[in-house]
Structure formats: structure tokens, C-alpha cells
Image: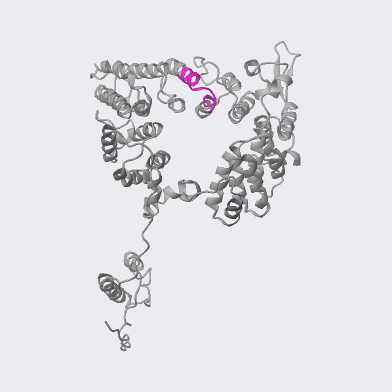
């Protein structure tokens, strides 16, 4: 087919429309020609007509098809997935869970039907624990589900295996799978392949360099640290911060020289991260310096009738303190001296307080009275130190008894801090403490604490939660106040507890002061809970679990 040059424009008529990308034409039409000039045209009164003319030509061009061209290279087949296939019953269950992607989630919805989409994370966890491969026909739906819910992505990508990465390279909507995979879905060199490692580190994209450093850190910490040192001086500040954060994995005394050198970095954020990492090494020089500073601020006054802790907060933040990570400028509304004291105590190794405070145990130290209203500041700093240093003895002391009037313990000033302290304890001890808290104080403040307990909940914790829900129901409490806990129970309660709940599924007699319709809501919620628990038991059995 021959082509001829476009005719010259006739005076008084707009020029012939020029080819323009369809997306630009659509944008101009949506925004209006007053705000966006059509591509290849001049603005003014003729712009709307020119836009329509150009769109007409572009439509004909698009419909006319493309000229024959050399075929693209056929993609390589996806890598084989050697894992065993799902049992048929489990495959059918997966299809049912994925079909319910419109589920609203949460414990506040009405009706007795379970939310299948909220069961998908647990199903994936069980399937991954048993090492099954995803059925190929479910991969697109799985990737779509993970695209919409970031909390599903790690489990979905593990279950989907190498075929998910193969598909992600063909569909831009699933590119998140490549970003989540080490090296962006490309094969990383082995620790012994020094030449490939060096080349990728010097020439690779930032994401691949982070993946390489993280992988090396898990396999050979010294190799990763030495590789980082080769380019440290020339890296951007934000990149240095990300690379430095990778040293958290496998942090050891051998990292101290590198981290100590980073205390002089020109970036404040890098210095702060280096100081935080060094404070997690109890034998480091920085930890020793912080212990000396904090110890000089806190002492036992034995001249009083009852031994009392006295605090003398720092009067200045000198250059040495700033180099070791102390932030000099206090936040708005916070006193400078208390701000400096909190940072020193938080960074000091907790093991130093036994020697500095007369050989007392953490429980004995926490029980001492503190003079001049410094108690809350001092105990809050010890809370942060216990969480940072993962010290269960100090966490127990600061949490105190769950049945105490001040249920959070002497040092926990918020539910968030209690939850962090609990996370340093073993799963069984954590569940027992929260069960005691729920039994004494009910569920109104327990939501955050329940969230740090291992799933499924241990039997004492599960019984305490069910008993507290039953008490709330019988008291005619406002039912929607407990929707969050009910949603947690659906996901975390042991399926073996379903039999205990059957008696709670009937509509109870409502007290005179109860919220209107509360009885029906409670009955629906308990019906949904029992149905969900039995579904979870069936899922476990279908996947070959006990």
C-alpha cells in the first residue's frame, strides 16, 4: 500500500491531525482543552475540534492493525516446582476461600456466616508449613489477592513459588512480586562467587544491592560487612542508612569497629542507627560509656528510712553524648534534662544496674521508690531498654502482676509498651500473663495485648477470652464495643474450643438496661465464631494436620 504526503493546510482550517498517543488524547479530553492542550495542536477556540479530529485519526489507525513484524522471542518456561500438590479437598477449600474476596473482614459485621477471606492467611500458613505447591490455575487469583492486601504477600509468594515470579514478569500489575523477591526475582551469586558478588555490588541497581547484602549477611556476616566497607565512603546517606540496617541480622561483637566508625558519619540518621546497634552489644565501648553516664545519674540514697532512688539528670548534652547517639534537641513540651536522661538509661546495658544499685534484682530495683517525681521517666526508659535488649527478666519486673490494680505494672505507661514488653517473653508465659489480665480487668483494654500472643491461643488464654465475652454479654454490654476482640477470636482461638461455645449461640434474655438488639447481635457473633472455628479445624484436617 502506497502512502502520499499529507496535504498542505488550507487557510482558515486547522492543520491535519498528527499522530499522538491515545493516553494523551484521553487525558486532554478528561481535563478539557482549556487546561490541557491537545498533543500536536495549538490552544485556542479551535482546540476542541482539533482534539476530536486527532482522536478520529488515532481511532482509525488503532483499528487498522499493525504491520507484520518479526515475532518476539518466546519466553522461557517457568521453573519447575518440585513441591507436592495439594490434596483434592484442600484445593477445593482454597478455591472457595479465593472466591470470597469480597468479604468485609473484621468482627463488626452482622450475620452468622464466617468471613472466608479472613481465613485465607491461616490457610496459607498451614499450606506453607506442610510444603505444598499452589495449583497453577489459582496463581492469577492468588496474585490479585496479594496485590490488594500487602499482609498476604509473604505467604502468597511462598505458596505460589517460582511460577509466581514468572507470571509477574509478564503482567505489570504483579510486579510487587518481583520487588519482594531477593534480587528482584533474579538469581543472586553464591558467597564463594567473589567476582560476581563484586560486580553486582558495584554495578547493580539499589534493590539488588540491598538483596545481595541481606543474603550475604545471613550466610557470611563478615563477608557482607567487608563488602559494605569497600564502597561505604561513596554511598549516598539514605543508602548508607539502609545498608547499615542490614547489620541487625547476626549482629555480633565483630561488627563493633565498623559501627564505632559510623558514629562519626556525616548523616545524623546513620549515626543514630549505629549508636542503636552498638547499644544492643552489652560489651561494646559505647554501651560502657552509656552505662557510666546513666550510672552517674541514678543512685540509691541509703540515708533515708526506706532506700530510695535519687536521680540527677544531665545538665548538658556534650559532644561525646551526641556522638554516641543522644539527640540534643528535646521534642516540644518535653524538658531537656528528662529527655537526655531517658536516652542514657535506654541505651545503658540493663546488666549494669545490679552492680550499681547494690546487687538488687530487676524486681527489687523496680520496687524501689524514686524521689522527686522521676519515677515515670526512669521506668519508661527501662521499659524501652528491656524491649531493645530483649531482656525477659526486666520485662517481667516492669510488667508486674497482671492482677495488680495498676495492671500495666510499675514501668509500663501505655498499652503499647506493655505489648512490647510481653513480646520479649516466651509464648506460654505471654499467654498466661494476658489471660490473668483479661480475667481481672476484662477485655476493654486487652486488644493490643491479645495481638502479641501466639496463634492459636493457649487454652488458659482462650478460656479467659470466652469467659470475658460471656460476662459482657450477660451484663448487657454494648456488643459492638467487643467486635475487634471477637474478630481476633475468630482468627486466634483454638478450634478445639468450638464445643464450649455452643451454649452461647442462643439469643439470651436481655436485661432491661441492655442495648436494643444486643442479644441478637451476641448470638450471631457466637454463631459466626463457632462456625469459623469448625472451618479452621476442617482446613487443618484437609491439609494433613492433626
Q: Is residue 196 left or right of residue 230?
A: left
Question: Does the magenta portion include 170?
Answer: no
Q: Is residue 112 left or right of residue 464?
A: left
Name which residue lies at 69% across and 44% down. Answer: 262
Give whichever of 100, 451 is nearer the camera. 100
- Residue 428 x %, y %: 48, 19
Q: Which residues are magenta?
A: 420-434
Q: Is residue 543 left or right of residue 193?
A: left
Give whichever of 191, 405 is nearer the camera. 191
- Is residue 44 positioned above or below 483 on the image? below
- Residue 286 x %, y %: 72, 35
Give whichever of 195, 336 is nearer the camera. 195
- Residue 293 x %, y %: 74, 31
The quarter of the picture where residue 496 lies is: top left
- Is residue 168 positioned above or below 338 on the image? below
Name which residue lies at 58% across and 52% down. Answer: 196
Quarter that holds the N terminus:
bottom left
Give whichever of 350, 228 is nearer the camera. 228
Question: Does the magenta portion include 423?
Answer: yes
The quarter of the picture where residue 306 lies is: top right
Name which residue lies at 58% across and 43% down. Answer: 216
Quarter that holds the C terminus:
top left
- By secondary structure, the bulk of the magenta-drawn segment is best described as helix
Colour approach in the figure: one colour
- Is residue 498 positioned above or below 190 on the image? above
Amino acid at each position: 500500500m502506497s502512502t502520499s504526503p499529507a496535504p498542505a493546510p488550507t487557510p482558515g482550517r486547522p492543520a491535519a491531525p498528527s499522530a499522538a498517543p491515545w493516553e494523551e488524547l484521553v487525558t486532554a479530553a478528561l481535563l478539557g482543552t482549556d487546561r490541557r492542550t491537545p498533543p500536536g495542536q495549538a490552544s485556542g477556540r479551535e482546540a476542541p475540534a482539533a482534539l476530536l479530529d486527532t482522536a478520529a485519526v488515532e481511532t482509525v489507525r488503532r483499528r487498522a492493525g499493525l504491520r507484520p513484524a518479526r515475532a518476539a522471542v518466546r519466553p522461557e518456561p517457568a521453573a519447575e516446582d518440585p513441591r507436592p500438590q495439594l490434596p483434592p479437598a484442600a484445593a477445593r477449600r482454597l478455591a472457595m476461600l479465593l472466591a470470597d474476596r469480597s468479604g468485609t473482614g473484621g468482627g463488626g459485621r452482622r450475620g452468622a456466616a464466617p468471613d472466608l477471606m479472613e481465613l485465607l492467611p491461616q490457610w496459607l500458613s498451614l499450606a506453607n508449613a506442610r510444603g505444598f505447591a499452589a495449583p497453577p490455575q489459582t496463581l492469577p487469583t492468588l496474585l490479585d489477592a496479594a496485590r490488594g492486601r500487602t499482609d498476604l504477600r509473604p505467604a502468597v509468594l511462598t505458596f505460589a513459588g517460582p511460577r509466581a515470579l514468572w507470571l509477574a514478569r509478564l503482567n505489570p500489575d504483579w510486579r510487587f512480586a518481583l520487588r519482594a523477591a531477593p534480587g528482584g526475582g533474579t538469581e543472586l551469586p553464591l558467597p564463594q562467587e567473589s567476582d560476581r558478588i563484586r560486580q553486582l555490588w558495584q554495578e547493580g541497581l539499589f534493590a539488588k544491592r540491598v538483596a545481595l547484602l541481606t543474603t550475604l549477611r545471613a550466610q557470611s556476616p563478615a563477608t557482607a560487612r567487608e563488602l559494605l566497607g569497600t564502597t561505604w565512603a561513596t554511598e549516598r546517606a539514605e543508602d548508607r542508612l539502609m545498608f547499615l540496617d542490614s547489620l541487625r541480622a547476626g549482629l555480633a561483637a565483630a561488627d563493633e569497629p565498623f559501627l564505632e566508625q559510623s558514629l562519626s558519619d556525616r548523616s545524623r540518621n546513620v549515626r543514630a542507627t549505629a549508636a542503636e546497634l552498638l547499644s544492643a552489644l552489652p560489651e561494646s565501648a559505647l554501651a560502657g560509656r552509656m552505662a557510666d553516664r546513666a550510672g552517674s545519674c541514678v543512685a540509691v540514697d541509703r540515708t533515708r528510712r526506706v532506700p530510695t532512688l535519687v536521680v540527677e539528670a544531665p545538665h548538658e548534652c556534650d559532644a561525646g553524648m551526641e556522638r554516641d547517639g543522644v539527640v540534643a534537641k528535646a521534642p516540644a513540651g518535653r524538658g531537656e534534662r528528662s529527655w537526655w536522661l531517658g536516652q542514657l538509661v535506654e541505651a545503658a546495658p540493663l546488666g549494669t544496674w545490679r552492680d550499681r544499685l547494690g546487687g538488687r534484682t530487676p524486681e527489687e530495683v523496680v520496687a524501689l521508690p524514686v524521689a522527686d517525681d522521676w519515677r515515670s521517666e526512669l521506668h519508661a526508659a527501662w521499659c524501652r531498654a528491656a524491649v531493645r535488649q530483649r531482656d525477659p527478666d526486666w520485662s517481667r519486673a516492669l510488667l508486674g502482676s497482671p492482677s495488680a490494680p495498676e495492671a500495666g505494672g510499675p514501668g509500663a505507661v501505655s498499652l503499647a509498651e506493655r505489648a512490647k514488653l510481653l513480646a520479649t517473653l516466651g509464648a506460654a508465659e505471654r499467654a498466661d500473663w494476658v489471660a490473668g489480665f483479661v480475667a481481672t480487668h476484662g477485655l476493654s483494654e486487652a486488644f493490643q495485648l491479645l495481638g502479641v500472643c501466639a496463634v492459636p491461643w493457649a487454652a488458659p488464654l482462650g478460656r479467659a477470652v470466652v469467659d470475658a465475652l460471656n460476662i459482657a454479654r450477660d451484663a448487657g454490654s454494648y456488643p459492638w464495643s467487643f467486635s475487634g476482640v471477637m474478630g481476633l477470636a475468630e482468627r486466634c482461638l483454638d478450634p478445639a474450643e468450638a464445643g464450649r461455645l455452643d451454649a452461647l449461640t442462643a439469643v439470651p434474655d436481655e436485661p432491661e438496661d441492655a442495648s436494643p438488639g444486643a442479644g441478637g447481635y451476641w448470638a450471631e457473633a457466637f454463631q459466626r465464631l463457632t462456625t469459623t472455628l469448625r472451618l479452621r479445624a476442617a482446613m487443618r484436617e484437609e491439609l494433613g494436620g492433626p
